[in-house]
Image (tube, rainbow, N blue to C red):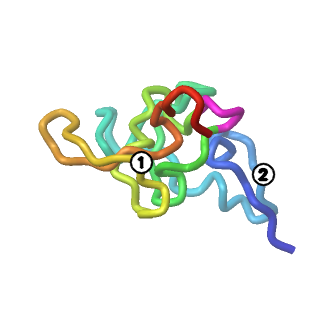
Amino acid sequence: ALYYLHATYICNSYVSCDDGADEEGCTAVDGNITRYSCMQWNNGRHVNIFNYTRCAELMYGYRAYCKNYIDQTNCTDNAKVGLTCHINGHLSTVSNSVICKKPGLL
């Protein structure tokens, strides 16, 4: 059977998948934080950002895969794009999970 695994369980130092796939390829190659890596919110580990963790739904409605929410930009799934704007001088998409809603709208 297949199970859904929330992005925050990927690379969290605990094997959740029977084959350990959730902990493979996690450690970023260099120590520099880039748009492809980040410090993870729950353990401060420097990890790679994968397409399946990028713009993933926020855990508990506020926790992202990355501590600085950089994983909520450069969305690879157009269905998850909330807006497009310039971030650090580069055109980027931003996840609809982190876009503030207007009062009264759900």
Quadrant of residue 62 within the rendered picture: top right
The residue nearer to you, when weighing 90 against 106, is 106
Q: Mark on residue 49?
A: none
Q: Which mark is first along the chain, 1 or 2? A: 2
Of circles 2 and 1, which is in front? 1
Where 65 sits versus 104, above or below?
below
Instruction: Tell me what residue is drawn at x 66 percent, y 55 percent.
Output: 22
Whether 62 is among the magenta residues is yes
State the SS at label 1.
strand
Secondary structure mostly taken by the magenta-highlighted segment of the chain: loop
Q: State the extent of the magenta-drawn residues as a range.
A: 59-63
Q: Is residue 10 left or right of residue 29?
A: right
Three-letter code for the amino acid on which mark 2 is drawn: Ser
Residue 28 image offset from top left, x and y in percent:
41, 44
Q: Quadrant of the C terminus?
A: top right
Quadrant of residue 86 within the rendered picture: top left
Residue 6 image offset from top left, x and y in percent:
69, 49
Instruction: Tell me what residue is drawn at x 49 percent, y 27 percent.
Output: 67
Q: Which residue, given by chain and number where applicable, does mark 2 sit on?
A: 16
**Marks 2 and 1 in Cβ contact (< 8 Å):** no
- Marks 2 and 1 sit apart, C-alpha to C-alpha, by 30 Å
Q: Is residue 72 left or right of residue 90?
A: right
Instruction: Tell me what residue is drawn at x 45 percent, y 33 percent.
Output: 69
Q: Which residue, given by chain and number where applicable, does mark 1 sit on?
A: 82
Instruction: Tell me what residue is drawn at x 48 percent, y 55 percent.
Output: 80
Residue 31 image offset from top left, x and y in percent:
33, 33
